[in-house]
Structures are given as structure tokens and as C-alpha cells.
Amino acid sequence: MNSSIPAHSAQPIILFDGVCNFCNASVNFILKRDPKGIFRFAPLQSGEGRKLLEKFGLSIDDLDTMVLIDGDQHFTRSSAGLRIAARLSGLWPLFSVFLIVPKFLRDLVYKVIAKNRYRWWGKRDVCMIPTPEMRARFLD
């Protein structure tokens, strides 16, 4: 795995809750629909994840959001999810039309899912360990 954060990564980085079953399923979903290998990944709880959160002024204790880091910009919650969908294969880019919906409305739905994700889908004791085939796509 790559153990250093690029100063300016050409590839967008997705930070996710590494112990959340739903979040891990979301990463696997993205991996299957990202045949060009656009995205790289790191758990929010990892050293690299925490460094990136600090770099962008985000709380290292706020683990209820997916974060998309794209160049010098970062996106959280529904904005991250919709911007990720826009770059996936298939019909998923069509979901980016929801970016026209005000963020506070989109994030209401996101927050309900985030608040209940452990209860609805469960939680792991440790962060996911990528398979050897996926390892190069993960930072830490």
C-alpha cells in the first residue's frame, strides 16, 4: 500500500468509515464501477485518513461522513456521494443531477442513514483489509 500522501494527488481520494459494514459495501460498489481506477481510498480511522482530514480542516472525530478529496477541494456527505457517482461507469452519473437540490436537503437524508448505519448494517471490529488485487488503490 502507498504509505505517503501525495502533495497534490491526480487521483481523487475517498475517505470512508473503515469499520462500517455499509461504508465498506459502498467502497466495494465503487471499486466494481470504477474500471479505470480513478479513485483511491483510505479509512477515516487510518493514519493517512487522519492526516488528510487535518489537512482540510475537518474533524478527525467526525466519522459519520464520506469525504471526497479531489485536488485541492474536498466534499462531504451527499456532495461527496453524488460527485463520486458522476465518475462511475453505467448510469450512475445520472445521479449527479441531484446536485441541484440544496445541500441542506440532500444532507438530511444522508445524516439519517449515517446516524443509523451501525444499527442497520452492523459494524466491524477492525477496518477492512483490501484484497491483494485492490491493495494498490488504498493509501494506508
Image (tube, rainbow, N blue to C red):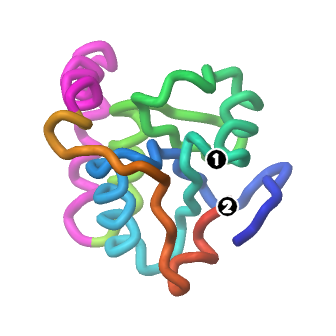
What residue is disc 1 on? 46
Residue 90 placement (x, y as % from top left): 24, 71
Nearer-N-terminus badge (2/1): 1
Nearest the eye: 81 or 65? 65
Q: On screen, 108 above or below 6? A: above
Q: Closer to the camera, 137 or 88? A: 137
Q: Report crowding for label 2: few under 14, some 14 to 19, many 20 or more residues within 10 A (C-alpha).
A: many
Looking at the image, residue 61 sits to the left or right of residue 64; the answer is: right
Report which quarter residue 47 is drawn in.
top right
Q: Residue shown at 33%/71% (left/top)?
A: 33
- Locate the N terminus and report the quarter of the image it occupies: bottom right
Q: CA distance from mark 2 to mark 1?
A: 9 Å
Does the magenta portion include 102? yes
What main secondary structure does the magenta stretch of the protein show? helix
The spot of residue 37 in percent (x, y) is 52, 74
Reply yes or no: does residue 110 show up in magenta. Answer: yes
- Observer-side mark, 2 or 1, equals 1
**Viewport quadrant of the C terminus:** bottom right
| Residue interval drawn in magenta | 90-116
The three-letter amino acid code for the residue at tag 2 is Leu
Across and down, in percent, residue 82 comes to 33, 43
| Secondary element at tag 1 | loop
Task: Please tell me which residue is depicted at 62% across the width and 26% down the height of the picture.
Answer: 60
Relative to residue 78, is residue 40 depicted above or below? below
Query: Relative to 46, does residue 76 appear above or below in the rendering?
Result: above
Instruction: Tell whether label 1 touches label 2 (CB within 8 Å).
Output: yes
Q: Nearer the viewer, residue 68 or 92?
A: 68
46 displayed left or right of 77: right
Name which residue lies at 36% across and 43% down: 81
In the figure, is residue 26 to the left or right of 45?
left
Residue 139 numbered tag? 2
